[in-house]
Amino acid sequence: MSKKKEKKAPVVLEQIAILDFAAEAKCIAKVNDEVIFVQGAVAPGDIADLRILKSKKSFKQAQAINIQPLSKHRTEVACSHFGICGGCKWQHVSYESQTAFKAQQVKDNLTRIAKVKLPEFQPILGSEETYYYRNKLEFTFSCARWLTEDEIGKDDLGSMNALGFHVPGRFDKILPVDHCYLQPDPSNAIRNGVRDFADANGISYYELKNQQEGALRNLIIRNTVTDEWMVTVQFAYATEDEIKLVMDYLKSTFPMITSLNYVVNQKGNDTFHDLEVVCYHGKPFMVETMEDLKFQIGPKSFFQTNAKQALKLYQLVRQYADLQGNEVVYDLYTGTGTIGLFLAKYASKVVGLEYVEMAVEDARINAELNGIKNATFFAGDMKKVLTEEFIAIHGAPDVIITDPPRAGMDLDVVNQILAVKPKKIVYVSCNPATQARDLALLDVAYEVDVVHPVDMFPQTHHVENIVRLKLKQKE
């Protein structure tokens, strides 16, 4: 009879100094010259015990435990869910330190990966609002909530229902959220109101594991700077009476909701782009305002989640594009066309390209809404759309704006840019590492003359970066 293998106790390194910030909201420690990437609520200057999670040849990964908070970078944490919820991993770090590290992260990536000649960087543009800055939050209903360490093993756990966020690394466990500091009021009141109403009326929560039962699945709350509010409820296995009960409750209790919608989704995932959205009350969209432009946002629309900071980002893009009115501008990875439409009245012509057909439909609606006639938008695989034939039809670009996803630009797109050689490129990135890789590829013809980091997401490690490139002068 084979003996069951005993599980080894985890290795714990005691009293280790935390040395610096690292990527992905981690920190760095060193033991005997070996680098350890540390996760958990630590900051440089803290002392902590490190529970080793993974050991590689050149580094280790560890979880910080028994933290002695000594760091000068620390500040008071606002949220009672900090440390379990993965949404705001840097709440314990002062905002000044957050922005300083983000700027350094951009510098490190562009220096070490791009290895191109760089100008002096512009100071990072911080966000005026460091809490309550998001205009969209998505909450999940679950009948199997996350248990705290104190609750594990207890018999009387009370209700197992939860409405909140996924615990990091667990698709099937939801952390109940009482107050979230990411979206302004009445976001918290709407979420908590729906939760209490459902519990009082015996309306069931979705079963995330077997996905075969439960009425309430998902709650999406969106708002604009002009105080329009959109609420979309995803139901799974709800009766018509249950749907009506919940929607009438929201309609009567929260009159500030200008767009109230619902979706019935019994698929294996939460995406509803291919499902019918029913507008139960109000308009089927909101309208966001940026300067003199209006953007129509529907339940399926993408829009920058920090609208006030997005406006400042777009203003910088406009400044660095430095349009004189006679340029053909290509806006690559245009999304819903916000940057392209923002630049249209300063250009002769704007051509927007985007993978997602639905986003392009939104861009066209917004062009029409604003009476913009000189901007056209096309959907398709970028490397297949941006061809010599396409450029011959629509004109060679004088300026290219590119705002690709985290993976950066496709190599074929980079090569096409090098082939058409616009005078200027303004490259907006949410991932300075892939941006740096693309800058290295563009270095054969372009030089970087502006680098300007922008913080769009306070309390997180994410950073945006604007780079302007100009054609190199022939020697």
Image: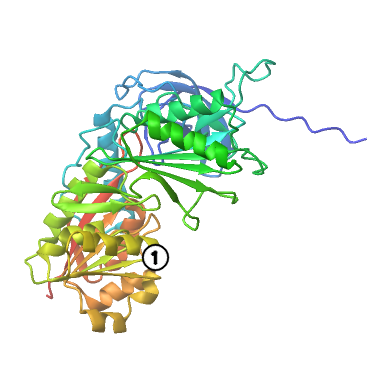
Nearest the viewer among 373 and 116 is 373
Nearest the viewer among 128 and 270 is 270
Nearest the viewer among 462 and 256 is 256
Q: Percent x, y for residue 315?
A: 15, 51
Q: How is the rendered protein coloured? A: rainbow
Q: Name which residue lies at 44% across and 26% down.
A: 193
- In this view, 247 is above or below 74: below
In which image quadrant can residue 241 be found? Answer: top right
In which image quadrant can residue 207 be found? Answer: top right
Figure quadrant of the N terminus? top right
Q: Name which residue lies at 22% across and 71% down.
A: 445
Q: Percent x, y for residue 115?
A: 28, 58
Q: Name which residue lies at 44% across and 23% down.
A: 178
Q: Which residue ends up furthest to the left in the rendered image? A: 324
> Which amino acid type corresponds to the residue marked 1 in the rendered image?
Glu
Q: What is the total number of numbered labels drawn onto the structure image?
A: 1
Q: Percent x, y for residue 45?
A: 35, 24
Of helix, strand and loop, which one carries label 1? helix
The answer to whether one can see residue 122 in this image is: yes
Query: Seen in the image, is 253 located left or right of residue 326?
Result: right
In which image quadrant can residue 365 be found? Answer: bottom left
Crowd tier of the residue under label 1, counting other residues whose Cα lies within 10 Å: few below 14, some 14–19, many 20 or above: some
Query: Seen in the image, is 224 located left or right of residue 216?
Result: left
The answer to whether one can see residue 454 in this image is: no
Figure quadrant of the C terminus? bottom left
Query: Seen in the image, is 94 located left or right of residue 145?
Result: left
- In this view, 380 is above or below 365: below
Q: Percent x, y for residue 64?
A: 49, 26
Query: Seen in the image, is 55 located left or right of residue 180?
Result: right
Q: Which residue ends up furthest to the right in the rendered image? A: 1
Residue on which disc 1 sits: 357
